[in-house]
Image (spheres, rainbow, N blue to C red):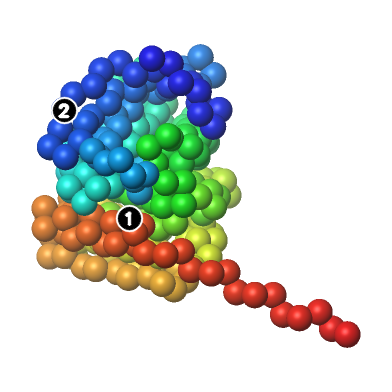
């Protein structure tokens, strides 16, 4: 079945039963490219809260679905996971030589950001999803992409970042990347939407100082939870993060402050 929502054409490839719901294999089509995705939908007659899941470098959508996706499904939250450019089932390879090119780095960043923003809109427009209760979960590379996309998409209500932080100080072409994809600038633009960061005290990929810089730049409400480990969070932290997101997506949306009265 082919369905177009929010500018993305989606074709369902397969559906399988899951405990508490179903898993749908989807192919998105964007600018002639195939974007593979997996969607977990809970068994419920009511519109469900939902989250977009973004994986880490060299990883794939399946890892996000099998971990945080299932933890969310158990709490009645739908989850959509994508393969980011050059990952998973996507065409191309992670060629280190190509990624040393600043032009190629920027091209991949921009593609990932465009796809992520469209995926947020598609998820919010889904017939089974409550458009007022959409979140983003990013892990490692996905946290960098996720926080920037979330800042630009008002539909995102809460953000969970695992092994996320600021760009490393020794990133090749760091100033060029930051000019178009700056996590610090993005996290300030969340504008009071709840943020939870899960970071390992022994993480050597996204180091604690990177996490602390991003957290310091964020506005309230925010929380940084440290776990005694490395880059991938323990199962108990993933489950706790899923519980936090489910609770934030179930809470009533805060009212925007009233504008001050016009002077007479």
Residue in the image at 42% along x and 65% along y: 252
> Which quadrant of the view contains residue 116?
top left
Q: Is residue 198 above or below residue 220?
A: above
Determine whether 240 is above or below 24 in the image: below
What residue is at 22 percent from the left and 59 percent from the top? 243
Q: Estimate the x, y position of residue 242 in percent, counting from the top left.
A: 23, 55
Q: Quadrant of residue 31?
A: top right
Tag in front: 2 or 1: 2
Q: Residue 191 or 17: which is nearer the viewer?
A: 17
- Tag 1 secondary structure: strand
Q: Position of residue 115 (x, y in %)?
A: 47, 33
Return the residue at label 1.
161
Let me know if residue 242 appears in the view: yes
Query: Residue sitting at 64 percent across and 75 percent down?
Result: 258
Secondary structure under tag 2 reads strand
- Which of the image's four quarters has the N terminus? top left
Residue 95 sits in quarter: top left
**Visible residue check, residue 167:** no
Which residue bears the numbered disc 2? 17
């Amino acid at each position: 079945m082919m369905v177009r929502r929010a500018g993305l054409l989606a074709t369902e490839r397969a559906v399988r039963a899951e405990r508490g719901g179903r898993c749908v294999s989807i192919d998105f089509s964007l600018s002639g490219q195939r974007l593979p995705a997996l969607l977990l939908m809970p068994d419920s007659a009511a519109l469900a809260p939902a989250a977009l899941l973004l994986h880490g470098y060299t990883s794939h959508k399946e890892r996000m679905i099998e971990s945080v996706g299932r933890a969310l499904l158990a709490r009645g939250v739908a989850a959509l996971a994508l393969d980011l450019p050059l990952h998973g089932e996507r065409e191309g390879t992670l060629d280190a030589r190509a990624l040393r090119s600043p032009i190629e780095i920027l091209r991949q960043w921009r593609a990932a950001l465009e796809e992520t923003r469209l995926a947020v809109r598609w998820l919010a427009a889904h017939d089974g999803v409550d458009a007022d209760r959409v979140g983003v979960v990013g892990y490692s590379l996905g946290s960098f992409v996720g926080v920037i996309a979330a800042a630009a998409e008002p539909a995102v209500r809460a953000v969970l970042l695992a092994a996320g932080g600021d760009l490393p100080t020794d990133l090749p072409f760091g100033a060029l990347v930051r000019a178009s994809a700056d996590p610090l600038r993005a996290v300030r633009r969340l504008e009071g939407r709840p943020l939870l960061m899960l970071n390992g005290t022994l993480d050597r990929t996204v180091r604690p100082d990177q996490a602390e810089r991003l957290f310091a730049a964020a506005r309230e409400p925010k929380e940084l939870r440290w776990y005694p480990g490395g880059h991938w969070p323990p199962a108990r932290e993933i489950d706790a993060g899923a519980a936090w997101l489910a609770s934030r997506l179930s809470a009533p949306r805060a009212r925007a402050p009233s504008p001050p009265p016009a002077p007479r």
